[in-house]
Image (tube, rainbow, N blue to C red):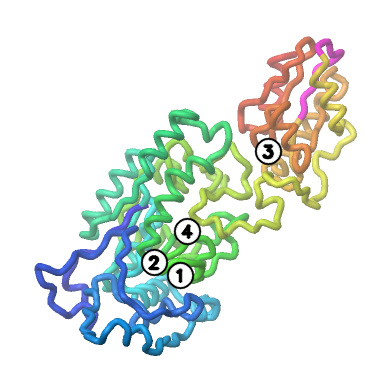
């Protein structure tokens, strides 16, 4: 994502922007930079980050001059004055703004934080945030994370947005040494093998952390309907549970989500009605847009997040930028990484299906001279992709009954997941394996088409 500031001088009004700026005045720091100011020793727990005039210098402010001529000894014995600052109730504010429009929420955010807040822009439909900020008439800043792996269309879109709004996006880049170490040790596409978290941590999360350290608040395009598994409870404003702001420590950064309660259709109706430029990838079937290797178009009936990291489990598709959305106590949210087992009812129930135990599938994998071939699904009952293919897999079992092909299932979450990953090629749920009659090595079904005809064609190819 990248940081931009609106360049229209006429849009900057109010006493905080009225003073003249001398040629010798230091330039405002970029996103991710920190300027140290002399300030009273105020405990972090008592600081109200929304009342900046009480305890914090604006980003463009000149350092206060110390005109005191008192001897150091006298100064050291002077009683310390700690200014009490009222703590903002952001949970209460979120409730007050729950029914507010995105424009009203955006205006409130920009009014409250001024130059200490910025819009996080990914190059997708979150361009709506920039339009809302533009409509408030207030100055605003925009930043974006350039991972080095974005689509060419996204880079062209960044340029178009800058020209359309007359702004300069402030781009954040990953550390070159970290990227070099990752690629040299694991290759350019390691995320297909061991998950996207490590690459996202280097290319996105750490640059974002640097950017946010120069801010007191940020604005995101999160919506509740984007990812039912992780974003269904996103408030319009919150204290960021993961990242730190300019003053450091938990609670030093506020996160605004002006379109949290807006549906995808309403966002697109707004973009069209305001003639806002959009990423050309959207016209090619892309809905959620990220890095080129990890983003693909989705079909009309698919959820937008199915176009991201499609080789992984579906329930917790977050790259780390919004890690606070994940509820660690929910096994489904943990993407199967924990060894907990959910209480979801079992699936793939049929008299034509064999439920394999750990010992059963180990024996099946070791056999070299099987009497009949097997097709087995490795599944987790909480996985909605597994749930979605239940009907077609049960129907497949019925069609194969009496044909000499056995149909089985093996629950591979919880304590069995590590074994399944190491011995059974489990990458994500569901994984489908075909055990040929005269070979010990199973063949992994490579397609995501899990209708009964596609599965039958896979079986027939090896019979």
Residue 429 numbered mark, or none: 3
Q: Residue furthest right?
A: 351
Q: Earlier in the sequence, mark 2 or mark 1?
A: 2
- Name the quadrant of the C terminus: top right
Residue at 67% across, 24% down: 444
Q: Dots 4 and 3: beta carbons under 8 Å? A: no
Q: Report which quarter residue 169 is drawn in.
A: bottom left
Q: Earlier in the sequence, mark 3 or mark 1?
A: 1
Residue holding disc 2: 246
**Residue 456 placement (x, y as % from top left):** 72, 24
Q: Report which quarter residue 177 is drawn in.
A: top left
Residue 86, magenta (yes or no): no
Instruction: State whether residue 253 is above or below residue 288.
Output: below
Residue holding disc 1: 252
The residue tagged with tag 2: helix, strand or loop?
Answer: loop
Crowd tier of the residue under label 3, counting other residues whose Cα lies within 10 Å: few below 14, some 14–19, many 20 or above: many
The residue tagged with tag 1: helix, strand or loop?
Answer: loop
Residue holding disc 4: 265
Residue 444 horizontal side relative to residue 34, left or right:
right
Q: Earlier in the sequence, mark 4 or mark 3?
A: 4
Q: Which span is picked out in magenta? A: 368-376
Name the foreground residue: 31 vs 434: 31
Q: Nearer the viewer, mark 4 or mark 1?
A: 1
Crowd tier of the residue under label 2, counting other residues whose Cα lies within 10 Å: few below 14, some 14–19, many 20 or above: many
Distance from Cα at disc 2 to Cα at disc 3: 41 Å
């Amino acid at each position: 994502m990248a940081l931009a500031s609106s360049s229209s001088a006429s849009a900057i009004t109010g006493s905080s922007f009225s003073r003249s700026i001398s040629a010798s005045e230091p330039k405002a720091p970029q996103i991710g930079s920190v300027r140290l100011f002399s300030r009273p020793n105020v405990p972090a727990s008592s600081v109200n980050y929304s009342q900046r005039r009480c305890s914090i210098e604006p980003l463009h402010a000149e350092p206060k001059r110390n005109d005191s001529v008192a001897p150091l000894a006298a100064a050291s014995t002077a009683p310390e004055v700690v200014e009490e600052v009222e703590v903002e109730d952001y949970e209460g504010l979120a409730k007050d703004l729950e029914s507010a429009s995105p424009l009203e929420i955006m205006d409130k955010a920009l009014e409250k934080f001024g130059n200490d807040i910025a819009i996080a822009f990914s190059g997708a439909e979150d361009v709506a945030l920039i339009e809302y900020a533009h409509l408030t008439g207030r100055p605003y800043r925009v930043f974006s994370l350039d991972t080095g792996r974005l689509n060419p269309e996204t880079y062209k879109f960044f340029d178009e947005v800058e020209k359309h709004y007359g702004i300069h996006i402030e781009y954040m880049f990953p550390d070159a040494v970290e990227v070099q170490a990752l690629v040299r040790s694991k290759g350019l596409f390691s995320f297909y093998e061991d998950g996207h978290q490590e690459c996202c941590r280097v290319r996105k999360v750490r640059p974002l952390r640097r950017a946010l350290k120069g801010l007191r608040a940020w604005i995101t395009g999160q919506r509740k309907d984007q990812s039912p598994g992780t974003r269904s409870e996103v408030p319009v404003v919150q204290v960021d549970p993961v990242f730190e702001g300019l003053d450091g420590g938990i609670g030093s950064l506020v996160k605004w989500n002006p379109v949290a309660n807006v549906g995808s259709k309403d966002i697109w109706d707004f973009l069209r009605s305001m003639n806002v430029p959009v990423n050309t990838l959207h016209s090619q079937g892309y809905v959620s847009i990220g890095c080129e290797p990890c983003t693909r178009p989705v079909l009309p009936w698919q959820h937008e997040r199915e176009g991201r990291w499609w080789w992984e489990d579906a329930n917790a598709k977050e790259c780390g930028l919004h890690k606070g959305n994940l509820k660690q106590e929910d096994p489904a949210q943990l993407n199967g990484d924990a060894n907990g087992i959910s209480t979801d009812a079992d699936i793939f129930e049929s008299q034509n299906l064999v439920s394999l135990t750990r010992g059963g599938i180990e024996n099946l994998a070791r056999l070299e001279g099987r009497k009949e071939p097997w097709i087995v699904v490795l599944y987790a009952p909480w996985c909605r992709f597994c749930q979605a293919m239940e009907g077609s897999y049960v129907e497949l079992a019925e069609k194969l009954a009496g044909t000499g092909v056995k149909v089985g299932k093996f629950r591979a979450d919880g304590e069995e997941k590590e074994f399944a990953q190491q011995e059974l090629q489990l990458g994500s749920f569901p994984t489908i394996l075909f055990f040929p009659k005269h070979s010990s090595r199973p063949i992994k079904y490579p397609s995501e088409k899990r209708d009964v005809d596609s599965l039958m064609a896979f079986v027939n190819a090896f019979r």
